[in-house]
Image (spheres, rainbow, N blue to C red):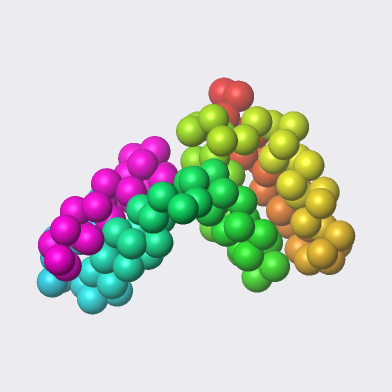
Amino acid sequence: MANEHREKGIEMFNEVYCNDLPQPPEPGQDRFFDYMLDTVFGQLWADERLSIRDRRLLLLGAIAALGEDMTFTIQARSALKRGELDREQLNEIVTFLTAYVGYPRGAKLKLAVQTLLAQMEK
């Protein structure tokens, strides 16, 4: 079962991140990645009760609340590349979340999204 979850986990990891992130280490080389691939991607992201877009929206909110603008950028880039969100929706997410996470965190997210969109235009 663990191998099945890992295989599904790698598949979902690559799908969720559009093959943009480095491949995780081989099984048994890093317990952190083994756990992440087996559970987070092999079970949670792979569960079909919520779409990848639904999960990404939830994750964007959680990441914004934590003030993790780098991780927000990774998620936002993948959402744009996968067609889950467009530029206008992404900017609206930042505006909406700012009301809940506060202006200092919202400003960091806004800057991160502006930078990301400029990079993707090139």
Q: Quadrant of the C terminus?
A: top right
- The vertical placement of 17 against 33, above or below, is above
Locate residue 3: give its quadrant. bottom left
93 or 46: which is nearer to us? 46
Q: Would you say residue 40 sits in the magenta stretch? A: no
From the top left corner, tell me how far across and down residue 73 is, in percent.
58, 49
From the top left corner, tell me how far across and down residue 109 is, in percent.
71, 53
- Asked if residue 91 lies left or right of residue 51, the reply is right
Q: Residue at x 72, y 36 (%)?
A: 89
- Asked if residue 22 lies left or right of residue 114, the reply is left
Q: Residue at x 61, y 57 (%)?
A: 58
Q: Would you say residue 10 sits in the magenta stretch? A: yes
* Stretch in magenta: 1-22
Q: Quadrant of the N terminus?
A: bottom left
From the top left corner, tell me how far across and down residue 81 is, in percent.
50, 32
Which residue is outermost to the front? 49
Locate residue 71: give its quadrant. bottom right
Q: Residue at x 49, y 46 (%)?
A: 51
From the top left corner, tell me how far across and down residue 12 is, in percent.
33, 48
> Can residue 104 be seen by looking at this rendering?
no
106 or 121: which is nearer to us? 106
Q: Residue at x 22, y 61 (%)?
A: 5
- Asked if residue 111 lies left or right of residue 57, the reply is right
- Asked if residue 27 lies left or right of residue 97, the reply is left
